[in-house]
Amino acid sequence: MVATQEMLFEWDEWKERALARGVAEDLAELGKNLMRDAYMQRWPEAVLGDCGWDDDGFGMLALACAKPAETRRDWERLYAQYHRRPACPLEQPLAAEAKALAPLYPATRPQGKSHTSLMMGHPK
């Protein structure tokens, strides 16, 4: 077995099976993400069956092959309802970045003297 295949998660294997059965790339990716996020984000038990966790994804695969348009609609609804990861804007305002980079503990140097002048023994 190739080393990269040993590292596959269930959702990665599901996507490979879906692609091998002729499921469109974007629908296979949506199914993979649905299966992964349902597990990683601990979606309710009642929903996990719809996300492939009760039957190793065979039901999801059958639906994706038989009724791709309906399956996409249903999966997008599930994703919209249960997906918890917040949207991450590509550009954040400068004020938000400044807060994120602010030190937790402010420097405790004496006022009016620089760090280098104290090291050199010279008052500033």
Image (cartoon, rainbow, N blue to C red):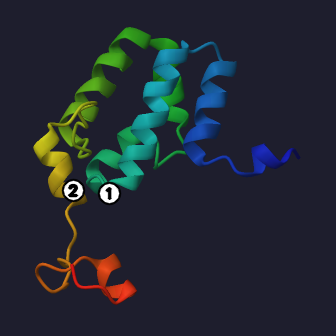
Label 2, label 1: how far apart the Cα atoms are: 28 Å
Seen at 23% across and 46% down, the residue is 84
Q: Where's residue 101, x and y in %?
A: 24, 58
Which badge, 2 or 1, is on the more N-terminal residue? Answer: 1
Q: Residue at x 34, y 77 (%)?
A: 116
Give the percent coordinates (x, y) of residue 98: 17, 51
Which amino acid type is shown beneath numbered disc 2? Ala
The image position of residue 114, as x and y in percent, is 24, 76
Q: From this view, report whether residue 40 is shown above or below residue 66.
A: below
Residue sitting at 11 percent across and 81 percent down? 111
Give the residue at mark 1.
42
Label 2's element? helix
Q: Nearer the viewer, residue 119 or 123?
A: 123
Mark 2 vs mark 1, foreground winner is: 2
In the image, residue 120 above or below residue 50? below
Classify residue 89 as left or right of residue 53: left
Q: Which mark is residue 20?
A: none
Q: Relative to 26, is 105 above or below?
A: below
Residue ranking furthest to the right: 1
Q: Quadrant of the C terminus?
A: bottom left
Q: 69 or 90: which is nearer to us?
A: 90
Residue at 48% in and 17% down: 26
Disc 1 crowd rating (10 Å Cα; few below 14, some 14-19, many 20+) is some
Give whichever of 95, 30 is nearer the camera.
95
Residue 100 - label = 2
Quarter location, residue 89: top left
Residue 43 appears at what percent x and percent y? 29, 52
Q: Is residue 113 left or right of residue 3?
A: left
| Secondary structure state at the residue bearing disc 1 | loop
Disc 1 residue type (three-letter): Arg
